[in-house]
């Protein structure tokens, strides 16, 4: 049988995990935002909303941790009712919503990258149709009409 103190410890650990995961996802995805295509823009909107949800998760988790700490200092169980209980629900659902939007963002970004790469490969001119380049030292130049016409009389 678990005691109330054990339940507090388990719940505090769960809150710490939510804080860590939310912070990590924001930091990780923020690192790679410059690599994400800006067209179309709607995936970036999903990312922004997911970040806001992760921030809401972090803030609400910190509020619940504070309430649990206060409750343990005063030897009561007040954190399980009222605002702290509601903040715990906000933490849970904002994290779930944030993860959902982040997964949709990641899938949309991968689809966009794959689609853009396939489109670029399909529209690229075959090598046989590109202008011939002449290598002179370290310079690469394209022949012009004047250079291929020969000497002028």
Image (tube, rainbow, N blue to C red):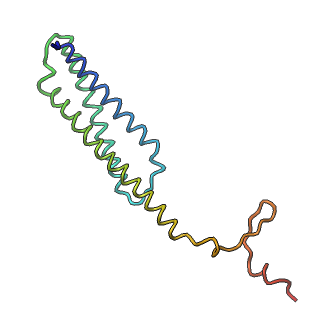
- Between 106 and 30, the one lying in front of the other is 106
Tell which of 135 and 85 is nearer to you. 135
Q: In the picture provided, is 130 more to the left or to the right than 20?
A: right
Residue 130 vertical placement versus 90 (above, below) = below
**Residue 44, image x, y percentages:** 37, 52
Q: Residue furthest right?
A: 153
The residue lying at 43 percent from left, 39 percent from top is: 28
Residue beneath the point at 47% across and 63% down: 118
Point out the residue furthest to the bottom here. Answer: 153
- The vertical placement of 151 against 74, above or below, is below
Please provide percent x and percent y for residue 31: 46, 41
> Where in the figure is residue 41, as x and y percent of width and height?
37, 57
Instruction: Please identify the quadrant where the N terminus is shown.
Output: top left
Look at the image and tell me in which quarter the C terminus lies.
bottom right
Is residue 119 toward the left or the right of residue 12 in the image?
right
Residue toward you, 132 or 70: 132
Q: Residue at x 48, y 61 (%)?
A: 117
* x and y, in percent, of residue 32 in the image: 46, 45
Residue shown at 21% from the left, 11% from the top:
73
Q: Nearer the viewer, residue 71 or 13?
A: 13
Count of marks overlaid on the render:
0
């Amino acid at each position: 049988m678990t005691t109330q103190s054990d339940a507090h410890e388990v719940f505090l650990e769960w809150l710490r995990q939510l804080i860590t995961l939310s912070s990590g996802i924001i930091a990780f995805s923020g690192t790679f935002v410059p690599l994400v295509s800006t067209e179309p823009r709607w995936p970036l909107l999903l990312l922004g909303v997911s970040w806001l949800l992760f921030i809401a998760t972090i803030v609400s988790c910190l509020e619940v941790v504070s309430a649990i700490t206060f409750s343990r200092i005063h030897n009561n169980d007040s954190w399980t009712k009222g605002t702290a209980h509601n903040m715990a629900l906000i933490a849970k659902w904002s994290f779930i919503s944030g993860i959902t939007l982040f997964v949709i963002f990641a899938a949309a970004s991968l689809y966009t990258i794959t689609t853009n790469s396939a489109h670029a490969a399909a529209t690229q001119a075959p090598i046989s149709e590109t202008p011939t380049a002449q290598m002179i030292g370290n310079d690469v130049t394209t022949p012009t009409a004047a250079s291929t016409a020969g000497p002028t009389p």
